[in-house]
Amino acid sequence: MHKFLIKCVNCALLVVILIGIPAITRAQFGNLQVASASKSRQLIFAGLIIAAVANVLLALFVKNRKDRILCWEWAAVFGVLAGVEYAVAAGYFNFDWLKKFLLWLRKEV
């Protein structure tokens, strides 16, 4: 039962952080955007860090070994996603190669 609860809460957090926050911050009224892209990235990064820390704290207090391992795994997932988000925001990781490939593909087809 604990495993199911841990998985449901973490999946809900993923949906809220990766889908909900960008949807809310990119709301537009006509040509006016409600929040900037940098604010959206900050909120996503903060949400991922908070979720990772929450999973680490839960792993420290859970007594069942399998539940503790599951919490550590989810903390690692959120930590990796936070690292990727930071790398994208800092410019270490970009998708220019994908953009060039798709433009080339569109030209060829």
Image: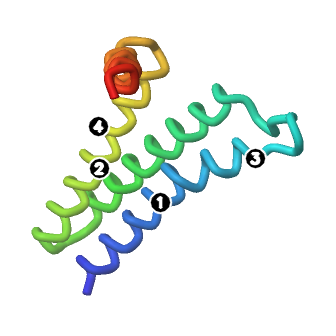
Cα distance in 3D space between marks 3 and 4? 27 Å
Q: Is residue 58 left or right of residue 15?
A: left
Secondary structure type for disc 4: helix
Secondary structure type for disc 3: loop
Q: Quadrant of residue 68?
A: bottom left
Percent x, y of residue 75: 29, 50
Residue marked by disc 4: 80
- Earlier-in-chain disc, 4 versus 2: 2
Percent x, y of residue 48: 45, 44
Residue marked by disc 3: 27
Going by the numbered disc 4, the residue's amino acid type is Val
Cα distance in 3D space between marks 3 and 2? 30 Å
Q: Residue at x 43, y 56 (%)?
A: 14
Number of the front mark, 3 or 4: 3
Cα distance in 3D space between marks 1 and 2? 16 Å
Going by the numbered disc 2, the residue's amino acid type is Ala
Colour convention = rainbow
- Hey, which residue is sitting farthest front in the picture? 109
Cα distance in 3D space between marks 4 and 1? 16 Å
Residue 75: mark: 2
Residue marked by disc 1: 15
- Hey, which residue is sitting farthest bottom in the picture? 1
Front-lying residue, 49 or 88 = 88
Percent x, y of residue 92: 36, 12
Indicate the quadrant containing the C terminus: top left, top right, bottom left or bottom right: top left
In the rendered structure, are the residues bearing label 4 and label 2 in contact, judged by CB atoms less than 8 Å apart? no
Going by the numbered disc 1, the residue's amino acid type is Val
Any part of residue 33 in sight: yes
Front-lying residue, 46 or 65 = 46
